[in-house]
Image (spheres, helix red, strand yellow):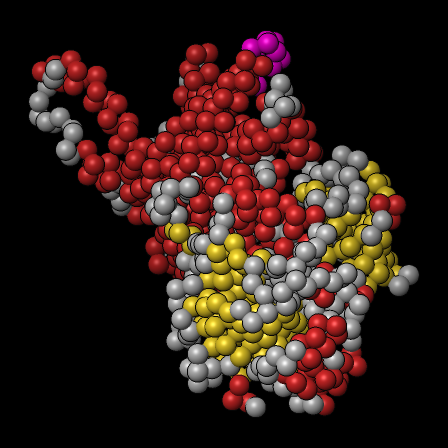
Amino acid sequence: MKLTAMSRQPFLGVALTAIAAIGISDFVPLSQRTVITALALIGISATLLICRPNLIGTYLFVFAGFFLLHVLQTSATAGLSLASLLGERPRMITATGAVVSEPRLLPNGKAVFLMQLSNVELEGVTRPTGATIQVRWKGKPSLGDELQLFGMAAPIAPPRNPGEFDMRSYLVRRDVHRALFVHYPEEGVLLRAGGGNPILSLAQRSRNWLQSTLCRGLDDSPEVKDFISGITLGLRHQTPEDIEEPFQQTGTLHLFAVAGLHVGIVAQLLWLVGSVVGVSRRWAAAAIIPMVLFYSAVTGLHISSVRAAIMSAVFMGGYVVERKPFTLNSLSAAAVILLAWNTNELFSTGFQLSFAVVGAIVLLVDPVTALLRRPTAPDPFLPRQLLSKSRRLTDPVLLKVTQNVSVSVAAFVGSLVLLFWYFHLVTPVSLVANAVVVPIAYAILAVALLSILAAAALPGFSLIFNNTNWFLAKLVIGIVHVFAQLPAGHHYLPHPPGLGSAKAKLTVLDLGAGAAVHLQTRNRDWLFDCGSQRDYDRLVREYLHTAGVNRIGALLLSHGDAQHIGGASKLLLEMPPALLIDNPAPDRSSIHKRLRHLYDERALRVIRPVRGESFAPAEEVRCTVLHPPRNFSASMGDDQALVLQLQFQSGPTVLLMSDSGVATEKALLESASNVRSDILIKGQHHSGVSGSVDFVRAVQPQLIVATSCDFPRHERIDDQWADDLREKDVRLFRQDQTGAVEIRFWSDRWEARGFANGETFRSSNR
C-alpha cells in the first residue's frame, strides 16, 4: 500500500501520538507536578491552536490530553478506593450490584463474572461505591442481573508458576482489584433479572437466539456446536482447550475472535441487500453503520470486533459524507476511539494483536501481492482480448490465490513478535494454514448468515444450512489438526536468556498437594511427575510452553497418586516422551492402571528401576534410585514412592523425596544409602509426618523445598517443624509462600529463587 499524505489520513498521526502519550504516562511516576505539567501542556497547545492552527500544536494537544486521561483512569479510581477500604486481608462483605460481564462456568459448577457494585456493606456499615469486582458464585446469573451477594472479599492472587496467566495484572488494567468468593448458592440473591444496559441486554438475547438457531440439529456433535458458536459469535469460553490449542499452534486462533473477516461478511451481505433494494450508496452506508456496531455488541464487545466495527463505521462514513475512505485512516480512527474510551486497552494482548495484524495486512498485502504476481501476471501492456482463453480463465484464480497467500504472509509478519512474546510460539505453518482455512471459514460464516435468514420463514432450509456447516466445521477442525502435527510447523521458544550461562535448571512447580519438577539442560528436558489432570491443563502445559519445551526426553512417575500423575495421559498424547520411567511397585491406583494400558497401546519405551539402579538424564546429571527396593510393596502409596538422587557434575546433589514419610526415611537410613544432599525437595506424607530429625540430620541439606497448602490439613507444613529447621540453620522454601522454585546450577555454584515472593538463596551464602 502506498502511504498518502498525512493530511489525507489525519487519524494516523493522532493514533501514534496517543499511543506514545499513554505509554510514557504509564511509566512516569504519578505526582502533583506530573498532573500540573500535563494541564499546562494542554493549555499551551490549546492557546496555540486557537491563535494559529498547526500540526505540531495539534499533536501536542493530543499528547497532553491522552497523557492526562491515562493518569485519571489509573489513579483515584473506584476500584482503588474499595481496595483501600477493604485492606489487604480477606473481609466478609455484602455486595449489591449488576453483572457486567458474561458469566463463565467453571468445571466445579461455579460461575465467574464481573459485577459493578452500587453499594457494599462492611461491618454493619453500608457505603455506596461504583467499583467493579470479580465474583465466584455457584449460581446461575446472566448479564445485566442485579444481585446481592454475601462472601469473602480478598486481593486477587498473583501467578505462582512461570507461564501461569496473570489474572491479577489483567484485572488491574480494568480497575478490578478484589475478588468476592461466595461459598454457598443460597448466599446470593437475585434482586432483578435482565437489568443493565438495554442495548447490551437486547444483544445478549439476540446472541442466545442466534446460537440456538445456528446449532439446531447438531446436538449429537458438541465439538462442532462449540466451534460454530466460537467462529460465528465469538463465544470462545465455550470452546474446549483441546480444540483451541491446535488453532493456536497453526496461527489460526484468530478465527474465534470476531474481527474484520466476520464484520466484513456482515457488511457485504447488508450492502448486497441494499443494492438489490435500490438504496443509494450513501443511505446504504448510513444504515449499515449501526447494524455492524450492534453485531459487535451481539458478539460480546471484544476488542477485535469493536475495532472492526468502528473501522467499518469510519470507512463507510466516508461514503456518507461523500469522501474517499482510506483503510489505514479508518484503522487509526478505531484505535483513537478505543483508547479514548479506555487507555488501558493499549496494554491488552487482544488490542495489540488485533491492530498489529490488521495494520500489517493494510501495509503489506499490496506489495507482497505484486511481488508474488510477477512470475504469473500477464504483460500489463498486452490487451486482454489477445490473451488465450485458458489464460483468461486461470488468471483470476491465480490472482485470488496470490492475494490469499499475501494476506497470510502479512498476518504472519504482523503477529510474529507478539505471538512469541505472549505465547512463546512461532508458527511457520500458519502461512499455509491460513491460506487453506480462511476461505472455508468465510464459507461457514456465509452459510451461517443464510441459516439465520431462513430460520423464521423456512426452518427446513435452516437445518440444511446447519448441516452444511457441520461438514465445513469438521473439515476445518480436521485440516487444522493435520497442520498442527506437521514437524516444525510450530515451535515453542523460551524468552531470552533461557538457561543463560547456567548448565542446568530445576523448576519445582507449585501445584498445592500435587507435584511436577522439570529438569532442563542444554539439550534435554525431563519431567518428574506432571500434576493432576486439572493442574496439567491449567499450569503444567503452559509452563512447558513458556520454557520452550516441544518434546519431553523422559517422564518419571513417582507413584500412583492422582495429584502427581493424573495429567500423564494427556501429556503422553500431546508430547510423548522418548522414555517413560515408572514405579515398579504394585498399587491399587485406577489412574496408574489406565496409564499402563496406554503404555501397551502406544508401544512406549518404559523402564521400571529399583534401588541401586541409575541412569543419566543428561551428560551433566546422574540419577540414582534410592527407593523402593526390588519386590517392595506397601499398604500406602506414599510409602512406595520413588526416591531419586540427582548428582550434578562437579556440583551439588539433589534429593527428590516425592510424598515419602517417616517409614521410607527410616528404610533409607537402615539401607545405608548415601542420602547426603545439598538440596532436599519433598512433598507431604498422607499421615502429615515427614522430614524426621534423624533423616534431616543424615541429609544435611543447605536448602529444603517443600510443598504446602491449607487443604487438606495434612498437606500443610507444621510450623514447629519449620522453626526447628530455622534453628538448625537449614533454609526452608515453603511453596505456600514462594510459589514455584527455580534452581539454577553452574559449575561452581547454584542459586534458588521463589517465583511468587522473589526470595533467593545462593550456595555461597552458606
- The residue shown at (39%, 48%) is 490
Quarter of the view holding residue 683? bottom right
**Residue located farthest toward the front when viewing the structure as drawn:** 631
On the image, the x and y values in percent for residue 1 come to: 26, 40
Name the one closer to the observer, 260 or 498.
Answer: 498
Q: Report if residue 25 lies within the magenta region.
A: no
Name the one closer to the observer, 361 or 560.
Answer: 560
Name the side, left or right, on which 349 lies relative to 89: left
Which range is magenta? 452-461
Name the one closer to the observer, 550 or 56.
Answer: 550
Q: Report if residue 457 lies within the magenta region.
A: yes
Magenta: main secondary structure = helix
- The residue shown at (42%, 41%) is 485
Name the side, left or right, on which 525 lies relative to 139: left
Quarter of the view holding residue 509? bottom right
Quarter of the view holding residue 587? bottom right
On the image, the x and y values in percent for residue 369 come to: 24, 36
Q: Can residue 493 be seen from the camera position used here?
A: yes
- The residue shown at (91%, 61%) is 124
- The residue shown at (78%, 50%) is 118
On the image, the x and y values in percent for residue 206 come to: 64, 27
